[in-house]
Amino acid sequence: MDHKDWARMEEADWHFRRVVRRFVKERDKIAIEGVSLPGMLILNAILRDGEQRLGDLAEQLDFTSGAVTAICDKLEKLGYAIRRRSEADRRSVSLHITEEGRRMVESNWAAGTYMIGAIFGEFTTDELEIQISLFRRLHDRLEGFAEGVLSQTKSLDDSATAAVTPAKTGLQRTNRFISY
């Protein structure tokens, strides 16, 4: 890997983190009739697919179980959803959308279509296919990411440390884009 490759990877990292931070910042500003964007995603999933177990919602939407629980608390408090225990398995809890929740999602449907269109609407079909492929690859590369980073911080003997320094690998930090 040459210096040019390292600089481009560093720049890609900076842009990636910048996009994530910007999206989270903008997403957190969204509340429709008291419901956050993640809450709207949950209500939309239930409206589309019917009553769902909380664990399934967490898996489908890539939320933690704790986040789903907190969102469901709010949705119930607002009268947009109801939790129900399964008759077959009392440990299993499903979320059902109320008529008020259905009305709210349907009356704000344009907001959801706007969000996707605002972010991805200007891209061609080919560009979207490339993005989807790259997003999948990035997602897969994040498996074990934290463990890998942390393994680099463990105490290593001097010879092992010297073997992995940027100078030894020919990589030089530009520090142009690094900011964690």
Image (spheres, rainbow, N blue to C red):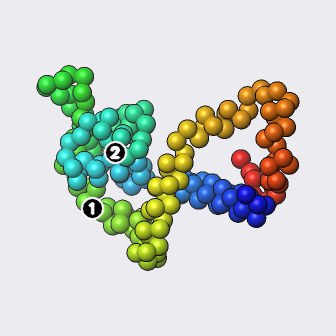
Of the numbered discs in the image, which one, if any, rests on residue 107? 1
Determine the residue positioned at 20% across, 28% down. 85
x and y percentages locating residue 73 in the rendered image? 35, 35
The amino acid on which the numbered mark 1 sits, given as a three-letter code, is Ser
Q: Is residue 58 left or right of residue 2?
A: left
Element on which disc 1 rests: helix
x and y percentages locating residue 174 in the rendered image? 82, 57
When the figure is inspected, residue 179 is found, relative to residue 145, above or below; the finding is below
Q: Is residue 34 left or right of residue 174?
A: left
Pointer 2 residue:
60
Q: Is residue 28 left or right of residue 153?
A: left
x and y percentages locating residue 106 in the rendered image? 25, 60
Tell me which label, 2 or 1, sits earlier in the chain: 2
x and y percentages locating residue 136 in the rendered image? 46, 55
Mark 2 closeness class: few <14, some 14–19, many ≥20 residues within 10 Å: few
Name which quarter of the figure residue 108 lies in.
bottom left
Mark 1 closeness class: few <14, some 14–19, many ≥20 residues within 10 Å: few
Determine the residue positioned at 50% across, 60% down. 134
Point out the residue furthest to the top here.
90
In the image, which is nearer the foreground, mark 2 or mark 1? 2
Residue 73 or residue 151, whichever sits in front:
151
Q: Is residue 29 visible?
A: no
Element on which disc 2 rests: helix
Quadrant location of the N terminus in the rendered image: bottom right
Q: Is residue 160 visible?
A: yes
Q: Is residue 121 left or right of residue 60?
A: right
Residue 5 or residue 74, whichever sits in front:
5
